[in-house]
Image (cartoon, coloured by chain):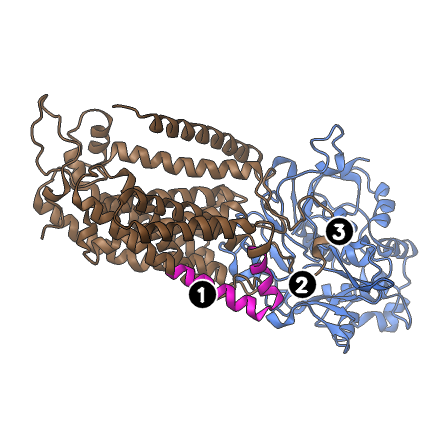
């Protein structure tokens, strides 16, 4: 395989990020929370923001995949598997980072054994567990028929294929159709589940009467719309840059459609944000308005103005509006939106916590940990980096080992050496599991 | 000084309860006023021991400590709390601490579900010395980043017409605590006597309750020590801590490290018949404590005064800490 300089560079960057991340992870595992900057007065920080960011990406990618499997959006048919796989990986990242955030990570099982139904967090854990099982099952059914073909490959991919088929050998059209029916059922169950799950994460914040910045009934809605916008954007990027057959007309068509969907969702998200901002700033009740002021004019104003508004909204909107038919540009817009959305998530978590709930608390007791100025520590950044590079690594591993792109042919044409097969078939000619 | 000898640290509730069962407190609430109980002459030594315990917080405990000698880590150490019968009879104009001590003993004789612990803090008497904060830090051996009762300071006016207001902020032990229903694992709950308790073994450290508390009374134990990594680690920091009727060893990086922590009205002291540390250490007697269900008690009386104020009542939390303005 020819390695282009860009690929090598990005690979090296990934390796460095992963190694640095491993160092941070080791620090976290060895010294617990001693080197973290979240704590007594700002109890949640970067990791919780990353958690809601990743579950948002997951729920967004999943709900878009349901457009295909449930609502039969034929034009996006080929990306179904990629969408589900993206949803699985981002969910893994989310669960990893929130697990590391726990004060007692090895007690997480208590949420299953002693769940308290009055707690939104308990509901969230139950819902994401159900969602996780469903996404994994659905991904498997989406991949199954192709895995059967895939397992005839040589080397590791073939071995993975043989392992993951769990003995399933039926790659026929009939079996594909049965898989598709299962996918429809799972997808139909998954839509309300993903909505409940991610809306529930929003509600987890929204129900807290003690935190006026979070205590808005718009919160679950904003979480869902933000999830769709960021998840859609990520999927747009992934398809635009990692689709195997970029010469096919279907590729252009898919990326353009994803770009349009993302644009619409982002616009809706911005309307909701404007609604929250304008109403609270106009009303000027300090407990509500001050958090919004700190978002706009606080020490981290640039997260909102440059990160979110400029790079995450203005530039991608311009790109999407001006070049809707240039897949790489649309993909770049998707990357910008998806990457900068962490800023939106940070601006949900942190401003809700940096204002003392009682006047004078910030000066009451002098202690490094009893402060309201939160900036993530080096260890927090490194663990955050680890989770991101872990997800990226999983993605490329999956791309190598799993049949994620368009369907594999039902019957392998014999290659020159007996089992060589073309890696991908042109989409247009493919028999797909949706052929009904 | 040897840590385990420091004395008067309230041990676990189980042992306390056992002691109370084994040696029931003499006298019903009415008894002290009857002539027969008056006649039972108060043993002078016991009386003095009672006074010593009363005579405020850590210093008194340090005085009493040498008499105890080496005791097993989890055994009750320090001067025993005075029994109701040992206390002098009530009289007009007696010190508030005396009265609260008697009322505490009286309340302890009732079943737990009939008690309703409450606190009154007279802001007009608070001078902002933070003795309660530090006494609490010492009593509960709190690490960096963990403080149960900070004293909030607010400056009012402009120079030269400036005044400052001080407001100690313990846990409000709300009647309707927002921190309780949000816990995913039920690790925090209201006791029958109204104290909101945390089960350190059950808590997973998600910190959701901290975001739910409108008073920021909950803090996170990140596992830090003041002196552990310094050239001279101090023995006092390596001592076991006693909370919720159990002993904990933070040096093992086990609970309460990684847990959410908060004020519990010095549960261990209460179970041993002692007033909370912040009450006994207050230099101006600005903090009062007692059973709100006993309508004759000092706190019940004070909490019914017209100048009483509770923090963020609009949230419907119904705090059991009352501020006198």
Chain assignment, label 1: A
Chain assignment, label 3: B
Q: Nearer the viewer, residue B125 or B103?
A: B125
Quarter of the image for residue A360 reads bottom right
Q: Nearer the viewer, residue B167 or A354?
A: A354
Which-is-in-front pick, marks 1 and 2? 1
| B237 on left or right of A174 | right
Give how far apart the Cα atoms at labels 3 and 1 are: 41 Å
Dot 3 crowding, Cα within 10 Å, few <14, some 14–19, many 20+: many
- Which numbered circle lies on residue A298? none
Same chain? Circles 3 and 1: no
What hue represents chain A? brown
Q: Helix or strand or loop: what does disc 3 sit on?
A: helix
> Tags 1 and 2 in contact by the CB under 8 Å rule?
no
Q: Note whether residue A199 is visible.
A: no
- Whole-percent x and y of residue A429? 9, 42
Dot 2 crowding, Cα within 10 Å, few <14, some 14–19, many 20+: many
Q: Note whether residue A382 is visible.
A: yes
- Please name the residue shown 8% across and 47% down the image: A174
- Whole-percent x and y of residue A132? 34, 48
Residue under label 2: B172
Does the magenta run of residues contain A279?
A: yes
Q: Which segment is the magenta one? A: A268-295
Residue under label 1: A218
- Please name the residue shown 26% across and 32% down the image: A401
Which-is-in-front pick, marks 3 and 1? 1
Dot 1 crowding, Cα within 10 Å, few <14, some 14–19, many 20+: some
What hue represents chain B? blue
> Tags 3 and 1 in contact by the CB under 8 Å rule?
no
Give how far apart the Cα atoms at labels 1 and 2 are: 30 Å
- Which numbered circle lies on residue B136? 3
Q: Helix or strand or loop: what does disc 2 sit on?
A: loop
């Amino acid at each position: 395989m020819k390695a282009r300089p860009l690929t090598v560079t990005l690979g090296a960057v990934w390796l460095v990020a992963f190694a640095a991340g491993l160092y941070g992870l080791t620090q976290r595992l060895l010294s617990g929370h001693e080197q973290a900057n979240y704590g007594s007065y700002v109890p949640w920080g970067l990791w919780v923001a990353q958690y809601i960011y990743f579950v948002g990406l997951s729920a967004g990618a999943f709900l878009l995949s349901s457009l295909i499997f449930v609502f039969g959006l034929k034009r996006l048919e080929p990306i179904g598997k990629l969408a589900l796989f993206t949803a699985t990986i981002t969910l893994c990242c989310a669960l990893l980072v929130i697990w590391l955030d726990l004060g007692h990570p090895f007690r997480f099982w208590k949420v299953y054994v002693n769940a308290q139904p009055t707690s939104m967090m308990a509901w969230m854990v139950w819902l994401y567990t159900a969602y996780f099982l469903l996404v994994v099952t659905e991904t498997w059914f989406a991949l199954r028929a192709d895995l059967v073909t895939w397992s005839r490959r040589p080397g590791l991919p073939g071995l993975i294929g043989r392992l993951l088929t769990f003995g399933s050998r039926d790659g026929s059209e009939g079996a594909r159709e049965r898989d598709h029916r299962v996918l429809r059922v799972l997808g139909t169950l998954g839509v309300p589940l993903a909505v409940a799950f991610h809306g529930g994460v929003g509600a987890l914040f929204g129900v807290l009467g003690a935190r006026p910045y979070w205590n808005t009934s718009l919160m679950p809605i904003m979480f869902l719309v933000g999830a769709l916008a960021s998840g859609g954007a990520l999927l747009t990027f992934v398809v635009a840059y990692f689709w195997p057959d970029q010469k096919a007309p279907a590729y252009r068509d898919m990326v353009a459609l994803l770009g349009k969907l993302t644009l619409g969702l982002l616009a809706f998200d911005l309307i909701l944000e404007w609604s929250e901002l304008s109403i609270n700033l106009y009303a000027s009740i300090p407990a509500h308005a001050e958090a919004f002021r700190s978002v706009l004019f606080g020490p981290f104003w640039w997260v909102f103005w440059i990160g979110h508004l400029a790079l995450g909204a203005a530039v991608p909107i311009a790109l999407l509006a001006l070049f809707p038919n240039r897949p790489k540009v649309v993909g770049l817009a998707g990357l910008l939106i998806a990457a900068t959305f962490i800023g939106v998530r940070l601006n949900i978590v942190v401003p809700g916590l940096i204002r003392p709930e009682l006047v004078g608390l910030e000066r009451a007791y002098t202690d490094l940990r009893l402060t309201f100025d939160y900036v993530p520590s080096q260890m927090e950044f490194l663990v955050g980096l680890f989770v991101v590079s872990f997800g990226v690594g999983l993605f490329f591993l999956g791309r190598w080992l799993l049949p994620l792109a368009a369907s594999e042919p039902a019957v392998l044409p014999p290659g020159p050496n007996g089992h060589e097969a073309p890696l991908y078939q042109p989409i247009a000619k493919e028999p797909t599991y949706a052929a009904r | 000084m040897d840590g385990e000898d420091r004395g008067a640290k309230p041990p676990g509730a189980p042992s306390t309860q056992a002691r109370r069962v084994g040696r029931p407190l003499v006298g019903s609430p009415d008894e002290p006023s009857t002539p027969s109980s008056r006649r039972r002459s108060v043993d002078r030594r016991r009386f003095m021991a009672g006074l010593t315990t009363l005579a405020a917080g850590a210093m008194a405990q340090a005085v009493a400590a040498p008499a105890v000698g080496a005791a097993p880590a989890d055994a009750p150490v320090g001067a025993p709390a005075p029994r109701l019968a040992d206390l002098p009879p009530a009289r007009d104009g007696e010190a508030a601490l005396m009265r609260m001590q008697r009322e505490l003993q009286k309340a302890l004789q009732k079943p737990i579900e009939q008690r309703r612990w409450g606190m009154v803090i007279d802001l007009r008497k608070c001078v902002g010395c933070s003795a309660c904060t530090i006494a609490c830090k010492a009593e509960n051996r709190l690490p960096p980043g963990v403080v149960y009762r900070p004293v909030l300071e607010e400056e009012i006016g402009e120079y030269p017409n400036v005044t400052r207001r001080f407001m100690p902020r313990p846990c409000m032990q709300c009647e309707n605590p927002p921190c309780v229903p949000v816990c995913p694992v039920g690790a925090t709950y209201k006791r029958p006597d109204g104290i909101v308790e945390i089960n350190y073994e059950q808590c997973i450290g998600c910190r959701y309750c901290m975001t739910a508390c409108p008073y920021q009374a909950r803090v996170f134990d990140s596992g830090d020590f003041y002196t552990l990594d310094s050239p001279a680690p101090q023995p006092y920091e390596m001592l076991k801590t006693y909370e919720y009727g159990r002993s904990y060893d933070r040096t093992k990086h086990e609970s309460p490290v990684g847990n959410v922590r908060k004020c519990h009205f010095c549960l261990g002291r209460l179970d041993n018949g002692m007033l909370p540390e912040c009450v006994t250490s207050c230099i101006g007697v600005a903090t009062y404590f007692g059973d709100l269900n006993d309508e004759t008690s000092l706190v019940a009386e004070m909490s019914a005064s017209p100048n009483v104020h509770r923090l963020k009542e609009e949230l419907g939390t119904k705090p059991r800490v009352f501020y006198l303005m």
